[in-house]
Image (cartoon, rainbow, N blue to C red):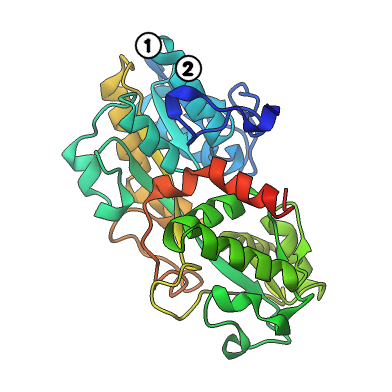
Amino acid sequence: MPKQTRFISILAIMLLLGCTKAKLDDPSTGAEEGKAPTPKAQKQELVVYSGRSAKLVDPLFWRFEEKTGIKVKVRSGKSDALANRIAMEGEKSEADLIFLQESGYLEVLGKKGLLASLSETQLEAVPREYRGSDNFWVGVSGRARVLVYASDSLKPEDLPRSLEALADPKWKGQVGWAPTNASFEAHVSALRHLWGEEKTKTWLSNMQGIEPKKYPKNSPQVRAVANGEIKIGWVNHYYLLRQKAAEPNLKAANFSFPTDQDPGNIMMLSGVAIVKTSKKRKAADALIQFLLSEDAQNHLTQKNFEYPAVKGIKIGPELEGLASKLSLVSQDKLTDIAGTQSLLQSLGLR
């Protein structure tokens, strides 16, 4: 069996070990916002397995260290590889917390009995749909799936009214997508749950019929739209917002489908959990409380352009309305990657 299709049995087919397994790095020291501040007296140290980009979340860990004197030692990697590592390490894991880009993997770990239950205070900080079904994890921030379009040649009313309509032949040669990207795979996994296998396969085949241009990930699609290479990309919302922060005159805009609960409008959550074997529960609780604090949530929203998970956090106008009509899908459905990759391979998309 090829390496990219081997699975860790303890997580059934939900987690991949092969093609997406990433090297676990030493704690990151570099970030866009400068060097890490020197923490206060460090009487404790937490080990965090982090599937998030260091440049986006390291500043949060530094602030926590400054506030509490608790050092954060980060082990970085891809979400699925880190979840696999927790499963394989079992009681020998050095991790105290696991902070993942895709919270669906936390749902799987929780159901396998590898995570600790969270407190009511932590759970109640976020809406019910932003926490695990068995109270083992909470969402920290969200990213909405959207279309990015050429705002100099298209108006919102020109765009497809639904994700299904994106496959209309009139868009032939004008659309971009990233079929090997993790967010693309997660969204297709959601479609398999919402639409079923046959309709999802039919839609993907119809999309192939309009000859979309392939890109390795989201950000090149944003650039391609702005440069006039394509008219529409299928991306996560914050890629455009981050590029516009550096280039305010970029000729591109985000669009979410106006149809109520359209399968194109889904929210993907990053999430955090405490590993059941951690001996540092009080310090681990403190880090989760900080990630859900107004300070951290404002940073994620204002600096990273992510959606806050906590109720009552103010968002900027660039985020308003993008995810107002979300299709409800359990986060663990987004991590059913094995079946999704098999489907994509059958269509020649991998």
Q: Is residue 170 above or below residue 223?
A: below
Residue at 45% across / 69% down in the picture?
316
Residue at 29% across / 54% down in the picture?
129
Give SS at disc 1: helix
Q: Are marks 2 and 1 in contact (CB under 8 Å)?
A: no
Q: Camera-side residue: 20 or 229? A: 20
- Would residue 324 appear left or right of 282 to someone viewing this image? right
Q: How many tags in the picture?
A: 2
- Residue 138 position within the rendered picture, expressed as x and y whole percent measured from the top left: 32, 43
Q: Is residue 226 above or below residue 302?
A: below
For residue 143, say whether it is visible.
no
- Would residue 210 appear left or right of 183 to someone viewing this image? right
The residue carrying mark 1 is 91
Give SS at disc 2: helix
Q: Is residue 176 above or below residue 295?
A: below
- Would residue 71 appear left or right of 123 to someone viewing this image? right
Amino acid at the residue labelled 2 = Met
Task: Answer with the quarter of the image where residue 279 lies.
Answer: top left
The residue carrying mark 2 is 88
Going by the picture, which residue comes out furthest to the left?
A: 120
